Image (cartoon, helix red, strand yellow):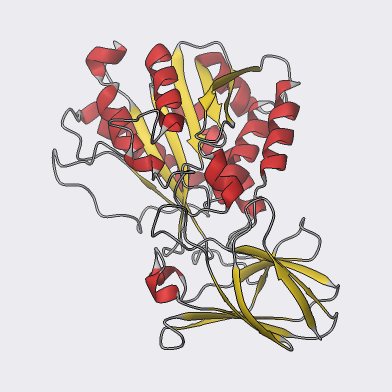
Amino acid sequence: MPIHDINAAFDSGNIITHSINGTEAKLSIRKDKNSEFFQWFHFRVAGTPGEEVTLKITGLNKSAYPDGWPNYNACVSEDRVEWLRAPSTFDADEDDGTLTITYTPTSPLSWFAYFAPYSMERHHDLIADICEYDGVSHRVLGHSIEGQPIDCLTMGQGDTQLWLYGRQHPGESMAEWWMEGALYALTDPANPHARKLLEKCTVNIVPNCNPDGSCRGHLRTNAVGTNLNREWDNPTLEKSPEVLAIRNAMDEKGVHWALDVHGDEAIPAVFIAGFEGIPSLTDEQSRKYHAYRDLLATRTADFQTKIGYPLDAKRKANLSLSTNQLAERYNDAKMGTNMGCIAMTLEMPFKDNDDLPDVDRGWSPDRCIHLAEQCIATLAELV
Protein backbone atom coordinates (compact mmCIF):
# COMPACT_ATOMS: atom_id res chain seq x y z
CA MET A 1 0.00 0.00 0.00
CA PRO A 2 1.56 3.37 -1.00
CA ILE A 3 0.69 5.07 2.34
CA HIS A 4 1.73 2.69 5.12
CA ASP A 5 1.29 4.92 8.16
CA ILE A 6 0.48 8.46 9.32
CA ASN A 7 1.77 9.47 12.74
CA ALA A 8 1.94 12.59 14.92
CA ALA A 9 3.10 11.11 18.25
CA PHE A 10 6.12 13.38 18.61
CA ASP A 11 7.16 16.86 19.71
CA SER A 12 4.66 19.39 18.26
CA GLY A 13 2.81 16.64 16.39
CA ASN A 14 -0.87 17.16 15.59
CA ILE A 15 -3.16 15.24 13.26
CA ILE A 16 -6.12 12.86 13.45
CA THR A 17 -6.21 10.13 10.78
CA HIS A 18 -9.74 9.16 9.73
CA SER A 19 -8.94 6.91 6.79
CA ILE A 20 -6.18 5.78 4.45
CA ASN A 21 -7.17 4.49 1.02
CA GLY A 22 -4.19 3.67 -1.15
CA THR A 23 -2.46 6.97 -1.89
CA GLU A 24 -5.15 9.15 -0.30
CA ALA A 25 -5.78 9.96 3.36
CA LYS A 26 -8.57 11.84 5.13
CA LEU A 27 -7.39 13.82 8.15
CA SER A 28 -8.38 16.51 10.63
CA ILE A 29 -6.59 18.69 13.20
CA ARG A 30 -6.84 18.13 16.96
CA LYS A 31 -8.00 21.15 18.97
CA ASP A 32 -5.79 22.76 21.60
CA LYS A 33 -6.54 21.22 25.00
CA ASN A 34 -9.51 22.88 26.75
CA SER A 35 -9.91 25.20 23.77
CA GLU A 36 -11.70 25.61 20.46
CA PHE A 37 -8.52 26.80 18.71
CA PHE A 38 -7.06 24.61 15.99
CA GLN A 39 -4.95 25.28 12.90
CA TRP A 40 -1.46 23.90 13.53
CA PHE A 41 -0.65 20.49 12.05
CA HIS A 42 2.55 18.45 11.99
CA PHE A 43 2.65 14.78 11.01
CA ARG A 44 4.73 12.09 9.31
CA VAL A 45 3.68 10.03 6.31
CA ALA A 46 5.29 6.66 5.57
CA GLY A 47 4.78 5.72 1.93
CA THR A 48 6.29 4.49 -1.28
CA PRO A 49 8.90 6.70 -2.98
CA GLY A 50 7.72 7.97 -6.35
CA GLU A 51 4.00 7.48 -5.56
CA GLU A 52 2.08 10.76 -5.38
CA VAL A 53 0.02 11.07 -2.17
CA THR A 54 -3.12 13.13 -1.63
CA LEU A 55 -3.72 14.34 1.92
CA LYS A 56 -7.09 15.91 2.72
CA ILE A 57 -7.30 17.88 5.98
CA THR A 58 -11.02 18.40 6.64
CA GLY A 59 -13.25 20.54 8.89
CA LEU A 60 -11.23 23.70 8.39
CA ASN A 61 -14.17 26.09 8.12
CA LYS A 62 -14.29 25.89 11.93
CA SER A 63 -10.56 26.42 12.39
CA ALA A 64 -9.25 29.46 14.24
CA TYR A 65 -8.50 31.37 11.02
CA PRO A 66 -10.36 30.02 7.98
CA ASP A 67 -8.95 32.87 5.89
CA GLY A 68 -5.53 31.33 6.39
CA TRP A 69 -6.21 28.41 4.03
CA PRO A 70 -6.85 30.01 0.60
CA ASN A 71 -3.56 30.52 -1.29
CA TYR A 72 -1.68 28.55 1.35
CA ASN A 73 0.77 25.73 0.52
CA ALA A 74 1.74 23.24 3.23
CA CYS A 75 5.34 22.84 4.38
CA VAL A 76 7.02 19.52 3.61
CA SER A 77 10.40 17.96 4.38
CA GLU A 78 12.03 14.59 3.84
CA ASP A 79 15.05 15.22 6.07
CA ARG A 80 13.48 17.56 8.71
CA VAL A 81 16.14 20.13 7.84
CA GLU A 82 15.09 21.65 4.53
CA TRP A 83 11.42 22.61 4.37
CA LEU A 84 9.79 23.27 1.00
CA ARG A 85 6.17 23.87 0.00
CA ALA A 86 3.83 21.18 -1.29
CA PRO A 87 1.09 22.22 -3.76
CA SER A 88 -2.14 22.70 -1.78
CA THR A 89 -5.68 23.82 -2.58
CA PHE A 90 -8.56 24.81 -0.31
CA ASP A 91 -12.23 24.04 -0.99
CA ALA A 92 -14.62 25.55 1.56
CA ASP A 93 -17.48 23.37 0.24
CA GLU A 94 -15.75 20.01 0.67
CA ASP A 95 -16.18 18.29 4.08
CA ASP A 96 -16.73 21.60 5.90
CA GLY A 97 -13.56 23.07 4.43
CA THR A 98 -10.77 20.88 3.07
CA LEU A 99 -7.11 21.56 2.39
CA THR A 100 -5.85 19.10 -0.22
CA ILE A 101 -2.08 18.56 -0.23
CA THR A 102 -0.47 16.67 -3.11
CA TYR A 103 3.12 15.50 -2.96
CA THR A 104 5.37 12.93 -4.62
CA PRO A 105 8.00 11.77 -2.11
CA THR A 106 11.48 10.70 -3.11
CA SER A 107 12.07 8.80 0.15
CA PRO A 108 9.92 6.52 2.34
CA LEU A 109 9.22 9.22 4.95
CA SER A 110 7.84 12.74 4.57
CA TRP A 111 6.92 15.29 7.23
CA PHE A 112 4.17 17.88 6.72
CA ALA A 113 3.59 20.94 8.90
CA TYR A 114 1.70 24.22 8.98
CA PHE A 115 5.09 25.95 9.18
CA ALA A 116 8.63 24.60 9.60
CA PRO A 117 8.60 23.27 13.18
CA TYR A 118 10.97 24.50 15.88
CA SER A 119 11.26 21.57 18.29
CA MET A 120 11.85 21.79 22.02
CA GLU A 121 15.06 19.82 21.46
CA ARG A 122 16.28 22.53 19.09
CA HIS A 123 15.21 25.11 21.68
CA HIS A 124 17.39 23.45 24.34
CA ASP A 125 20.29 23.17 21.88
CA LEU A 126 19.94 26.88 21.12
CA ILE A 127 19.91 27.86 24.80
CA ALA A 128 22.93 25.65 25.54
CA ASP A 129 24.91 27.03 22.61
CA ILE A 130 24.20 30.71 23.29
CA CYS A 131 25.13 30.26 26.96
CA GLU A 132 28.66 29.38 25.84
CA TYR A 133 29.28 32.88 24.46
CA ASP A 134 31.14 35.44 26.56
CA GLY A 135 28.90 38.05 28.13
CA VAL A 136 25.73 35.95 28.07
CA SER A 137 23.90 35.07 31.29
CA HIS A 138 21.00 32.66 31.69
CA ARG A 139 18.10 32.75 34.11
CA VAL A 140 15.02 30.59 34.54
CA LEU A 141 12.24 33.14 35.05
CA GLY A 142 9.74 30.52 36.18
CA HIS A 143 8.07 27.36 34.96
CA SER A 144 5.17 26.45 32.73
CA ILE A 145 2.03 24.62 33.83
CA GLU A 146 3.78 21.33 33.08
CA GLY A 147 7.05 22.33 34.70
CA GLN A 148 9.13 23.36 31.71
CA PRO A 149 11.59 26.23 32.27
CA ILE A 150 10.94 29.69 30.90
CA ASP A 151 14.46 30.46 29.67
CA CYS A 152 15.77 34.02 29.52
CA LEU A 153 19.14 34.98 28.04
CA THR A 154 20.63 38.37 28.92
CA MET A 155 23.55 40.25 27.38
CA GLY A 156 24.80 43.83 27.23
CA GLN A 157 25.56 46.39 29.92
CA GLY A 158 23.56 49.46 28.94
CA ASP A 159 20.93 51.20 31.05
CA THR A 160 18.24 50.83 28.37
CA GLN A 161 16.22 47.66 28.95
CA LEU A 162 15.31 45.86 25.72
CA TRP A 163 13.08 42.75 25.78
CA LEU A 164 12.69 40.32 22.87
CA TYR A 165 10.17 37.52 23.41
CA GLY A 166 8.26 35.15 21.18
CA ARG A 167 6.07 32.13 20.67
CA GLN A 168 3.35 33.11 23.11
CA HIS A 169 1.27 31.33 20.48
CA PRO A 170 3.16 28.04 20.09
CA GLY A 171 1.99 27.21 16.56
CA GLU A 172 3.71 30.38 15.36
CA SER A 173 7.03 28.58 15.10
CA MET A 174 8.48 31.27 12.83
CA ALA A 175 8.85 33.31 16.03
CA GLU A 176 11.54 31.01 17.39
CA TRP A 177 13.34 30.86 14.05
CA TRP A 178 13.44 34.66 14.32
CA MET A 179 14.77 34.36 17.88
CA GLU A 180 17.55 32.08 16.68
CA GLY A 181 18.56 34.68 14.11
CA ALA A 182 18.48 37.46 16.70
CA LEU A 183 20.57 35.51 19.21
CA TYR A 184 23.30 34.62 16.74
CA ALA A 185 23.38 38.19 15.44
CA LEU A 186 23.75 39.53 18.98
CA THR A 187 26.55 37.11 19.87
CA ASP A 188 28.54 37.67 16.66
CA PRO A 189 31.60 39.76 17.69
CA ALA A 190 32.01 40.89 14.08
CA ASN A 191 28.48 42.33 13.89
CA PRO A 192 28.83 46.12 14.33
CA HIS A 193 25.11 46.65 14.92
CA ALA A 194 25.08 44.09 17.72
CA ARG A 195 28.16 45.62 19.34
CA LYS A 196 26.58 49.05 19.19
CA LEU A 197 23.28 47.82 20.63
CA LEU A 198 24.94 45.93 23.49
CA GLU A 199 26.90 49.04 24.46
CA LYS A 200 23.65 50.95 24.91
CA CYS A 201 21.28 48.24 26.14
CA THR A 202 20.76 45.30 28.39
CA VAL A 203 19.02 42.85 26.06
CA ASN A 204 16.71 40.24 27.61
CA ILE A 205 15.55 37.44 25.29
CA VAL A 206 12.82 34.87 26.00
CA PRO A 207 12.86 32.64 22.89
CA ASN A 208 9.84 30.52 23.85
CA CYS A 209 7.12 31.82 26.19
CA ASN A 210 4.94 28.73 25.78
CA PRO A 211 6.95 25.48 25.87
CA ASP A 212 3.96 23.32 26.86
CA GLY A 213 1.86 24.41 23.90
CA SER A 214 4.87 24.03 21.62
CA CYS A 215 5.46 20.43 22.65
CA ARG A 216 1.74 19.55 22.57
CA GLY A 217 1.22 20.81 19.02
CA HIS A 218 -1.12 23.64 20.02
CA LEU A 219 -1.87 26.66 17.90
CA ARG A 220 -2.49 29.42 20.47
CA THR A 221 -2.70 28.11 24.04
CA ASN A 222 -0.75 26.59 26.90
CA ALA A 223 -1.39 23.25 28.63
CA VAL A 224 -4.68 24.39 30.20
CA GLY A 225 -6.08 26.18 27.17
CA THR A 226 -5.01 29.74 28.06
CA ASN A 227 -4.19 32.21 25.30
CA LEU A 228 -1.13 33.80 26.89
CA ASN A 229 -1.39 36.99 24.87
CA ARG A 230 -4.66 37.80 26.60
CA GLU A 231 -3.25 37.49 30.13
CA TRP A 232 -0.86 40.40 30.52
CA ASP A 233 -3.19 42.56 32.61
CA ASN A 234 -3.82 39.82 35.18
CA PRO A 235 -1.63 36.70 34.86
CA THR A 236 -2.09 33.92 37.44
CA LEU A 237 -0.19 30.84 38.56
CA GLU A 238 -3.23 28.70 37.77
CA LYS A 239 -3.86 29.86 34.18
CA SER A 240 -0.78 31.67 32.94
CA PRO A 241 2.35 31.17 35.07
CA GLU A 242 4.45 31.72 31.95
CA VAL A 243 3.25 35.33 31.57
CA LEU A 244 3.40 35.93 35.32
CA ALA A 245 7.05 34.89 35.41
CA ILE A 246 8.02 37.05 32.45
CA ARG A 247 6.09 40.11 33.63
CA ASN A 248 7.55 39.82 37.14
CA ALA A 249 11.05 39.82 35.64
CA MET A 250 10.16 42.85 33.55
CA ASP A 251 8.89 44.63 36.67
CA GLU A 252 12.29 44.07 38.31
CA LYS A 253 14.21 45.69 35.47
CA GLY A 254 11.72 47.83 33.60
CA VAL A 255 11.13 47.94 29.85
CA HIS A 256 12.20 50.72 27.49
CA TRP A 257 11.83 48.78 24.22
CA ALA A 258 10.00 45.48 23.60
CA LEU A 259 9.41 43.31 20.55
CA ASP A 260 6.85 40.48 20.75
CA VAL A 261 7.33 38.11 17.80
CA HIS A 262 4.37 36.32 16.16
CA GLY A 263 3.00 34.83 12.94
CA ASP A 264 -0.20 35.71 11.12
CA GLU A 265 -2.26 33.03 9.42
CA ALA A 266 -4.08 35.10 6.80
CA ILE A 267 -2.03 38.17 5.84
CA PRO A 268 0.72 37.42 3.26
CA ALA A 269 3.09 40.12 4.49
CA VAL A 270 5.48 41.08 7.30
CA PHE A 271 4.28 43.98 9.44
CA ILE A 272 4.36 45.52 12.91
CA ALA A 273 1.47 46.42 15.23
CA GLY A 274 1.79 49.12 17.87
CA PHE A 275 -0.04 50.53 20.88
CA GLU A 276 -1.98 53.50 19.52
CA GLY A 277 -4.96 53.06 21.84
CA ILE A 278 -3.28 53.04 25.26
CA PRO A 279 -4.54 55.65 27.77
CA SER A 280 -1.12 57.22 28.49
CA LEU A 281 0.10 57.45 24.88
CA THR A 282 2.61 60.25 24.28
CA ASP A 283 3.76 61.94 21.11
CA GLU A 284 7.32 60.76 21.78
CA GLN A 285 6.21 57.14 22.02
CA SER A 286 4.41 57.44 18.71
CA ARG A 287 7.39 59.13 17.07
CA LYS A 288 9.83 56.43 18.19
CA TYR A 289 7.48 53.64 17.13
CA HIS A 290 6.98 55.06 13.65
CA ALA A 291 10.69 55.78 13.32
CA TYR A 292 11.47 52.11 13.99
CA ARG A 293 8.79 50.85 11.62
CA ASP A 294 9.80 53.19 8.80
CA LEU A 295 13.52 52.55 9.16
CA LEU A 296 13.02 48.79 9.12
CA ALA A 297 11.08 49.15 5.87
CA THR A 298 14.10 50.84 4.29
CA ARG A 299 16.47 48.11 5.52
CA THR A 300 14.70 45.04 4.14
CA ALA A 301 12.34 44.40 1.24
CA ASP A 302 10.69 41.67 3.33
CA PHE A 303 9.05 44.29 5.57
CA GLN A 304 6.30 46.73 4.63
CA THR A 305 4.00 49.31 6.26
CA LYS A 306 0.92 49.38 4.00
CA ILE A 307 -0.79 46.19 5.22
CA GLY A 308 -1.48 45.31 8.86
CA TYR A 309 -4.06 45.30 11.62
CA PRO A 310 -6.65 48.07 12.12
CA LEU A 311 -5.54 50.70 14.63
CA ASP A 312 -7.18 50.82 18.05
CA ALA A 313 -9.33 53.85 18.79
CA LYS A 314 -7.95 56.43 21.22
CA ARG A 315 -7.83 55.04 24.79
CA LYS A 316 -9.51 51.79 23.65
CA ALA A 317 -6.51 49.46 23.63
CA ASN A 318 -6.94 45.96 25.01
CA LEU A 319 -4.46 45.97 27.89
CA SER A 320 -4.49 42.18 28.16
CA LEU A 321 -2.22 42.07 25.07
CA SER A 322 1.45 42.30 25.92
CA THR A 323 2.31 45.16 23.57
CA ASN A 324 -0.43 47.40 24.94
CA GLN A 325 0.19 46.36 28.54
CA LEU A 326 3.93 47.06 28.37
CA ALA A 327 3.56 50.42 26.62
CA GLU A 328 1.04 51.49 29.26
CA ARG A 329 2.68 49.82 32.28
CA TYR A 330 6.16 51.23 31.71
CA ASN A 331 5.17 54.81 30.98
CA ASP A 332 7.22 57.98 31.45
CA ALA A 333 6.74 58.18 35.22
CA LYS A 334 7.56 54.50 35.73
CA MET A 335 10.67 54.50 33.55
CA GLY A 336 12.02 57.92 34.46
CA THR A 337 12.42 58.90 30.81
CA ASN A 338 10.76 61.29 28.41
CA MET A 339 9.78 58.60 25.90
CA GLY A 340 8.02 55.80 27.78
CA CYS A 341 8.11 52.19 26.59
CA ILE A 342 8.12 51.44 22.87
CA ALA A 343 6.41 48.04 22.55
CA MET A 344 5.79 46.36 19.19
CA THR A 345 4.28 43.17 17.83
CA LEU A 346 6.11 41.76 14.82
CA GLU A 347 3.99 39.56 12.54
CA MET A 348 5.34 37.17 9.89
CA PRO A 349 3.22 35.14 7.44
CA PHE A 350 2.42 31.44 7.41
CA LYS A 351 1.90 31.79 3.67
CA ASP A 352 4.41 33.79 1.64
CA ASN A 353 5.40 37.43 1.51
CA ASP A 354 3.47 38.57 -1.55
CA ASP A 355 5.83 41.54 -1.97
CA LEU A 356 8.75 39.16 -2.55
CA PRO A 357 7.39 35.63 -3.17
CA ASP A 358 9.41 32.42 -3.05
CA VAL A 359 7.51 29.70 -4.93
CA ASP A 360 9.60 26.84 -3.54
CA ARG A 361 9.70 27.81 0.14
CA GLY A 362 7.20 30.59 0.80
CA TRP A 363 8.00 32.40 4.02
CA SER A 364 10.75 30.24 5.52
CA PRO A 365 13.09 29.79 8.51
CA ASP A 366 15.96 31.43 6.62
CA ARG A 367 13.84 34.49 5.93
CA CYS A 368 12.87 34.68 9.62
CA ILE A 369 16.56 34.61 10.54
CA HIS A 370 17.51 37.30 8.03
CA LEU A 371 14.60 39.49 9.16
CA ALA A 372 15.81 39.19 12.76
CA GLU A 373 19.24 40.45 11.74
CA GLN A 374 17.65 43.54 10.19
CA CYS A 375 15.41 44.11 13.21
CA ILE A 376 18.48 44.07 15.46
CA ALA A 377 20.33 46.48 13.17
CA THR A 378 17.36 48.86 13.17
CA LEU A 379 17.21 48.82 16.97
CA ALA A 380 20.92 49.61 17.11
CA GLU A 381 20.39 52.71 14.98
CA LEU A 382 17.46 54.03 17.04
CA VAL A 383 17.99 53.11 20.67
Depth order, front residue of 287/70: 70
Task: Check the image and report above or below for 330 versus 70.
Answer: above
Picture coordinates of residue 309 (x, y %)? 31, 54
Residue drawn at x 64%, y 38% is 180
Q: Quadrant of the N terminus?
A: bottom right
The answer to whether any part of residue 383 appears in the image is no
Question: Height in image: 233 above or below 333?
Answer: below
Residue 236 location (% of width, % of height): 35, 29
- Is any part of residue 182 visible from this angle? yes
Query: What x and y, as percent, mark residue 176?
Result: 59, 43
Horizontally, residue 18 falls left or right of residue 321, namely right
Q: Quadrant of the C terminus?
A: top left
Left or right, 159 with reference to 56: left
Labels in figure, total: 0
When asked about the image quadrant of residue 207, the answer is top right
Q: Looking at the picture, how far across and down is residue 212, in whole percent? A: 55, 41
Tell me the residue at 40%/37% (across/down): 292
Rendered image quadrant of residue 135: top right
Give the vertical position of 129 relative to 74 (above or below): above
Residue drawn at the location 19% of the way across and 40% of the way down: 277
